[in-house]
Amino acid sequence: MMENLFKHVNIKKENIHVPNGMAENIEKEYEEYEKKIQQAGGIDLQVLGIGRNGHIDFNEPDLKFEAKTHLVELDEDTIKANSRFFNSIEEVPTKAISMGIKTIRRQKHKKNSNFTGNSHRKGASKK
């Protein structure tokens, strides 16, 4: 996110909040992330990705809407789609921390900003 978005826009670093997928204790990381959202009084603006299989912020299509921030096992299609960011498919993470749908839906203004390419829109419309 830092490389592809935040370093190109005018946002103060203290206003950027992304969970650390490399944290030593992943469960503690996503629980703390959820607490930070609550302590801040909620989310004002979210930038979420939509995958070719219709996933929203790595919430693969089979996940329940009650999920809060959690660890997700990525689908094979998601892993393949993200392989373009790595030297080989073996380097692509198979899990990710994702803000759950329940957390996303608690957003204050109920307006998500999704940045996707044409291939994502076509894939999402096929399902």
Image (cartoon, rainbow, N blue to C red):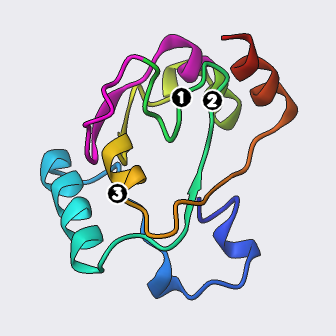
Q: Residue at x 82, y 38 (%)?
A: 117
Nearer to the camera, 121 or 77: 121
116 sits left or right of 51 in the view: right
Q: Position of residue 109 (x, y in %)?
A: 52, 68
**Percent position of residue 83, x then y:** 63, 26
Name the residue: 21% across, 56% down. Answer: 29
In this rendering, is residue 118 above or below 62?
below
Quadrant where the image shows the C terminus: top right
Say which amino acid is labelled 2: Gly
Q: Which residue is mark 3?
A: 20
**Residue 16 image label:** none
Q: Amino acid at mark 1?
A: His
Q: Residues within 10 Å of mark 3 (few under 14, many from 20)?
A: some
Q: Which mark is residue 55?
A: 1
Q: Quadrant of residue 59?
A: top left
Residue 10 screen position, x and y as percent: 71, 85
Which mark's residue is nearer the viewer, 3 or 1? 1
Q: Is residue 76 magenta?
A: yes
- In this view, 13 is above or below 87: below
Q: Which residues are magenta?
A: 62-80
Out of 118 and 75, give the one closest to the viewer.
Answer: 118
Which residue extends farthest right? 118
Give the Cα separation between the discs numbered 3 and 2: 21 Å
Residue 120: % across, % down: 75, 28
Disc 3 from disc 1: Cα separation: 20 Å
* Label 3 with label 1: CB-CB less than 8 Å: no
Q: Residue 45's image quarter? A: bottom right
Which residue is label 2 attached to?
Answer: 51
- Three-letter code, disc 3: Asn
**Is label 1 in contact with label 2 (beta carbons under 8 Å)?**
yes
